[in-house]
Amino acid sequence: MLSPVTKKQNNSRHCFVCGLENDFGLHASFYETESGDLVATVHPKNGHQSYPGRMHGGVIAALLDETIGRAIAIGRDDQVWGVTIELTTKYRKPVPLDGGFKVVGRVTKEGGRIFEGSGEIILADGSVAVEASGRYMKVPIDKITDMDFAAEDWFLREDTSDPKALDLPERASGV
């Protein structure tokens, strides 16, 4: 199912998942879609491996955690973030390093200060490699760090290669 992109989210300079200036990071880009999903595009490097040719499970969990936690910003104030309370992952198949993949996340239940979400790693062939669910606390960015993060480390980097729509399996689109 093709889902139009409605907004690209900001990147950081040094975050392991989205930091564009982190030499060891994943350099993920995040896109809000019309279907209400947040989708990260990822192109792993050899430094992200565990077994040869396979992505490290902890790195996979970090990707899912950030994607689900960021989903709270879809259509809302992007100054409120999800801080992880718990995350459960189910590894169904290895995630190869030799190509890109998508990470899809969404909010599944929302309360006053707490929300729940789920997400998947979608391989290039459309199959689901890893699933996750978690609980998060909504926290304003100025309560997470004492630095002026928004002014110093948080920015939008638009690129001509940014997708206008993303192909998502029905399972990941919430349909």
Image (cartoon, rainbow, N blue to C red):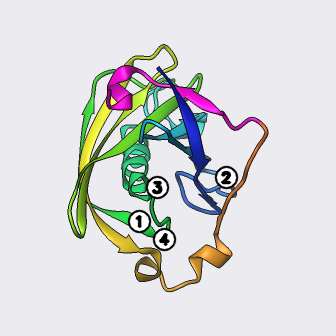
Say which amino acid is labelled 3: Gly
| Amino acid at circle 4 | Gln
Vertically, is 140 above or below 128?
A: below
User: How many residues crowd mark 4 within 10 Å: few (<14), some (14–19), many (20+)?
Assistant: few
In the rendered image, residue 163 lying in the magenta stretch gets the answer: yes
The reply to whether the magenta stretch includes residue 171 is yes
| Residues under numbered marks 2 and 4 in contact, where contact means CB atoms less than 8 Å apart | no
First in sequence: mark 2 vs mark 3 = 2
Asked whether residue 28 appears in the rendered view, the answer is no
Image point (33%, 30%), residue name: 130
- Residue position for label 3: 75
Residue 86 location in percent, x, y?
Answer: 22, 56
Q: CA distance from mark 2 to mark 4?
A: 26 Å
Residue 95: percent from the left, percent from the top? 44, 26
Crowding near the residue tagged with mark 2, few <14, some 14–19, many ≥20 C-alpha atoms within 10 Å:
few
Question: Which image quadrant is residue 14 in?
Answer: bottom right
Callouts 1 and 4 close, C-beta under 8 Å: yes
Sequence-first tag of 2 and 4: 2
